Amino acid sequence: MAAGEQFRAFAVTSRNLVEEARKAHRTSPIATAALGRTMSAALMMAYMLKGEDDLLTIQIDSDGPLKGIVVTADSRGGVKGYVKNPLVVLPAKDDGHLNVGAAVGKGTLTVIRDLDMKNTYTGQIDLHSGEIAEDITHYFAESEQIPSSVGLGVLINKDISVREAGGFIVQVMPFATDETVAKLEENLKNIPHVTDMMRDGAGPEDLLERALAGFDVEITDRRDVAFRCNCTRERTDRALLLLGEDELSELMMQKDGTSLQCQFCGKKYHYSPAQLLSLKEELVSQKIRKKETPDLPEAK
Ligand code: ZN
């Protein structure tokens, strides 16, 4: 909180988890930057959720070579995600920054909130630049009517590992005075790029101190963040069962069986022909159980 709660602000440093995502998906530098920016934004936006099991998903569908990004974060600091084409390589921009906007291209940004394990709220905007931070800023303005400033950055080492990643979101509350907003705008106009601040050793508090320089800033909470996926073998079992008997029989014919890979974390689940057979038997026994249960007469 800052300026007597006229602003609320969030900041995150996410180098380790973006590096984990890079390794899991073997992303090119530009794909790592796009994914890392989106993961950082999703973590801060998921922090705004109230319920323990609430989820926030950012989905970008676009016509650039990256094809799209999907990231899901929970309100407890966990995040997972992937880009549809992790191997994109494009020339850098004139200022030396990765050209994430060109990799993303034109399309839509959708924010999906899953609340209380039952309600889903969706907001969608057209992408403005594909640079992610600017698009999230527009999302808040257009879809939620909250004036916001979003800064995101991912800095890549020469060996393509992640050197720094993170960002901030500052939001203006409706009762903020013109004077404080003007001062904030002045701050944000002069603030260095997030990657430059982090290269100089800035942590989350430092990012906020720069963005909110001259205001009283109160840090109300801190939280750990991590790359976390909730995929399990039970889930892939269910996915295979949905294929049906014929498809399972076909997969069984392959001597090495089959593998399913989690899109979000890259984890592989292998199924031998024998394991596929037992899944098929489960399907058959489900069918028999259904037949044996007589239909109850309809209530009048
Ligand atoms: Zn997974």
Image (spheres, rainbow, N blue to C red):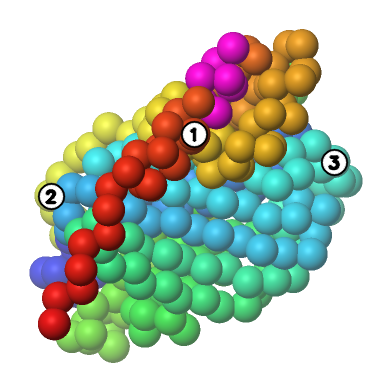
Please tell me which residue is depicted at 85% across the width and 41% down the height of the picture. Answer: 89
Question: Which one is closest to the eye, mark 3 or mark 1?
Answer: 1
Question: Which one is closest to the eye, mark 2 or mark 3?
Answer: 3
Answer yes or no: disc 3 within 8 Å of ligand 1: no
- Where disc 3 sits, the SS reads loop
Callout 2 environment at 10 Å: few (<14), some (14 to 19), or many (20+)?
few
Query: Would you place residue 96 above or below residue 135 in this image?
Result: above
Residue position marked by numbered label 2 in the rendering? 220
Quarter assignment of residue 117: bottom left
Q: Earlier in the sequence, mark 2 or mark 3?
A: 3
Q: Name which residue type carries label 2.
A: Thr
Can you see residue 30?
Answer: no
Q: Distance between the residues labelled 3 and 1?
A: 48 Å
Lateral position of residue 60 relative to residue 227, left or right: right
Which mark identifies residue 89?
Answer: 3
* Residue 226 point in image, percent of width and height: 37, 31
Using the image as rendered, state which of residue 35 and residue 172 is in the foreground: 35
Quarter assignment of residue 51: bottom left
Please tell me which residue is depicted at 76% across the width and 51% down the height of the picture. Answer: 66
Please state, as top left, top right, bottom left or bottom right, where the C terminus lies in the image. Answer: bottom left
Specify whether residue 78 is painted magenta.
no
Using the image as rendered, state which of residue 71 and residue 5 is in the foreground: 71
- Residue contact at pointers 3 and 1, CB within 8 angstroms: no
Please tell me which residue is depicted at 82% across the width and 53% down the height of the picture. Answer: 65
Q: Distance between the residues labelled 2 and 3?
A: 41 Å
